[in-house]
Image: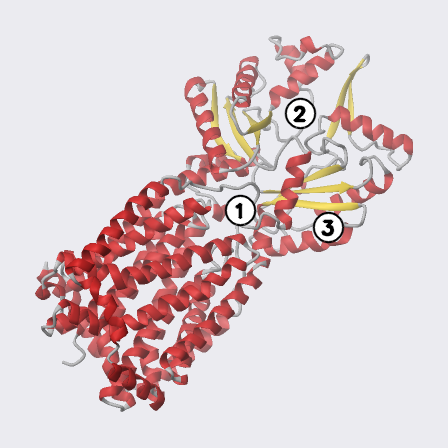
Amino acid sequence: MKRMAERLLLPIRRSEQWVEYLLFHQRPWVLSLFVLVTLILGWQAVQIRPDASFVKMIPASHPYVENYLTYQQDLSGLGNSVRVAVATTEDDIFNADFQDVLRQVTDELFFIPGVDRAAMQSIWTPNVRWTEVTEQGFVGGPVIPPDYDGSEASLDQLRINVLRSGQVGRLVANDFRSAIIEVPLLDFDPETGERLDYQAFSQRLEQRVRDAYVTDSVSIHITGFAKIVGDLIDGAKQVALFFALAILITLVLLYLYSRSIKGTLVPLLCSLIAVIWQLGLLNALGYGIDPYSMLVPFLVFAIAVSHGVQIVNAIRLESLQDQDKWRAARSAFRLLYIPGLTALVSDGIGFLTLMVIDIQVIQELAVAASLGVAVIILTNLLLLPLLMSYVGVGSRAIEHARRQAEQGGEHWRVLTWFATTRGAATALSVAVVLMVLGLYVAQGLQIGDLDRGAPELRADSRYNQDNDFITANYSTSSDVFVVMAVTAADQCSAFETLSSVERFQYAMQSVPGVQSSVSLADLSKRITAGLNEGNPKWRAISRNQFVINASLAYVPGGLMNADCSLLPVILFLDDHKADTLTRVSQAVETFAETYNSDALEFVLAAGNSGFEAATNQVIARAQYEMLAWVYGVVSLLCLLTFRSFKTVLCIILPLALTSLLCQALMAILGIGVKVATLPVIALGVGIGVDYGIYIYSRLSNYLEQGLSLTDAYFETLKTTGKPVAFTGLTLAIGVVLWVFSPIKFQADMGILLTFMFLWNMLGALILLPALTAFLKPHPELTSSPELFAPDR
């Protein structure tokens, strides 16, 4: 093991000598190169745009999604869509003024780029019709009378047509005081050929619909994925505000810590350059920033600040021995290059493990985070000491460090108790208790959304209020789960097919969470009863195929495909909570296993709830696989660096406890594991491992010099421990203010990140020395003097 590690680390040691020579002997050329790259990538960064897509949010290789994509052309309007409800304060919608507004809103939506106009539905679109059986046979037509003129007679006829259309509870509210416009969306903008810009689409909805038509007597309510994304992107301004506030807090606290203006501004500058480089590279590679990765730049900034504080602190301490700026920066570089590189490589590869999750938005987040870590290697591990070799930390900072050294830092000695046998036993006992409690509480952690509406937004947000309005006033909710009944061509209207679909719908009605359902079988029963004077005894699937054919003489769009080989069964759910989706999915799969045959198959799934069910299943399988990869990669890199399994345990176990407690906290706060939250756990591990590697690398140096563990840890606390504690507290203070964000997603992330910053810091300062005292790794195996010694 030792020989293999030496062979693997040999290129790193050689790269250190080469990089050190290049940085400190060719400074003008290297600095010029950094300036040039920053200008180029800065120009790229300002061009980055929000980039969100419905397809990116769903697992493309999941069987549900594959089935949907197979029949996508036959399921128009049952994928990505927006619902716009136009409501009135009058007694009902049957007045000329309201109908004029509803017509104008329908026309306005029809001409917005990205709308699937052929599948759009409203009582003002010609594809929404009524049918009636008379003595002369079937009669019917569009819901809006052809001679509609707003008169009382035409409004009365409209009322009759609405009642005959079967759209009450679907396109017309149960209380007749609002009407819905169903707006299916395309994945691209037909005018430009580009991917649909959800921010622009959401803004058009606001400007051309809500702002233009809302009055004292008319209100507009809009729901759908595109509106959620649009609201989140609009909230990015708040994210930028909190990001700026975090930078300001870091600036103040860093100055109070270092007492050096240059030692404060330079690491912050390098950290901001890292963010600029990351955004520039993302834009150059064709990526954008979607609402779920817009917090990644802050995490990159946080990691960069963490490493920057370590480097400035090392330069400050080296300046006590030699106040020459160039030599102090060079000595600090030698001291921190290997542990810093190890920590950052661990971070980057750990973030890449998110690629195992087959959801494009998470995979793009993995790319963004990994790119950010890669540029930190250049901006903070290389550029920062280069700049400090020019400016230095300043005499005031050196004098402050000297006074602290003379005082001896005795206030840190209290933490050395955890490096003693009794202190270690106490710390580890508490850790075991927390682990047991965490395991118990984390059992309540659920996959997916745990709230109605859009949990990314506040419960009192306009979107969730709109969603509550539609749910309260319509029989068909916005949470749609579509099951595809697949037959041979021309067999979707056969008696056996329709009776099986009817049996399926009856079974689904008994599943908690299913509100109602619609299928071709419902249409056939309703028309058959109409053919027989409305007698309810005839409201059934006829065994006579000629009667069935007559009942299906006219079928509205969306209930069957062109060759009659597929009929969707649309289930309207009470909500899209994780429990609801799990129950419905399991019920459908159980029914399909029992009744599927060569003649008829029930295939899952489409609709927004069907896609979310698929996403939840992928996340449920991938969350532990992702954690296994993250910890596996980080452990392997630590093992190669320190060449001791015991040392790996000392660094990794505190991180594992933090991950477990974070899951328990999510369960307590009612935060489900989903696309928005799953990556945070992996990102927290990446930030936390830096603390452990820096502390243990310095601890191993002092142990190698022959100091006892308590003395070695005391010296480590005075040098590396202080910046670790400072960084953890500073970053926690910066993100805890996110709880005041109007975006609930950001507030949740603020809570989780604050928790992980603090617990990773405490784990590194308390559990790491306790584990070291308990496991007693042998110095010869845990230290690498040729790697970590500042002088060679």
Horizontal side of 359 relative to 687 (left or right) equals right
Label 2 and label 3: CA atoms lie apart by: 31 Å
Label 2 sits on residue: 555
Q: Are marks 3 and 1 in contact (CB under 8 Å)?
A: no
Where disc 2 sits, the SS reads loop
Residue 727 figure quarter: bottom left
Where disc 3 sits, the SS reads helix
Counting every numbered tag in the picture gives: 3
Residue at the image position 32 percent from the left and 79 percent from the top: 312
Label 3 and label 1: CA atoms lie apart by: 25 Å
Q: Tell me if residue 541 comes above or below residue 268 in the rendering.
A: above
Label 1 sits on residue: 455
Horizontal side of 166 relative to 730 (left or right) equals right
Q: Residues within 10 Å of mark 3 (few under 14, many from 20)?
A: many
User: Which badge, 1 or 2, comes first in the chain's sequence?
Assistant: 1
User: Which badge, 3 or 1, comes first in the chain's sequence?
Assistant: 3
Residue 499 figure quarter: top right
Label 1 and label 2: CA atoms lie apart by: 37 Å
Q: Residues within 10 Å of mark 2 (few under 14, many from 20)?
A: few
Query: Which residue type carries mark 1?
Result: Pro
User: Which badge, 2 or 3, comes first in the chain's sequence?
Assistant: 3
Name the quarter where the C terminus is drawn.
bottom left
Query: Which residue type carries mark 3?
Result: Val
Residue 636 figure quarter: bottom left
Q: Tell me if residue 6 comes above or below residue 154 in the rendering.
A: below
Residue at the image position 57 percent from the left and 33 percent from the top: 574
Q: Which mark is residue 609?
A: none
- How far across and how far down the image is residue 755, in percent? 39, 57
Where disc 1 sits, the SS reads loop
Q: Which mark is residue 209?
A: 3
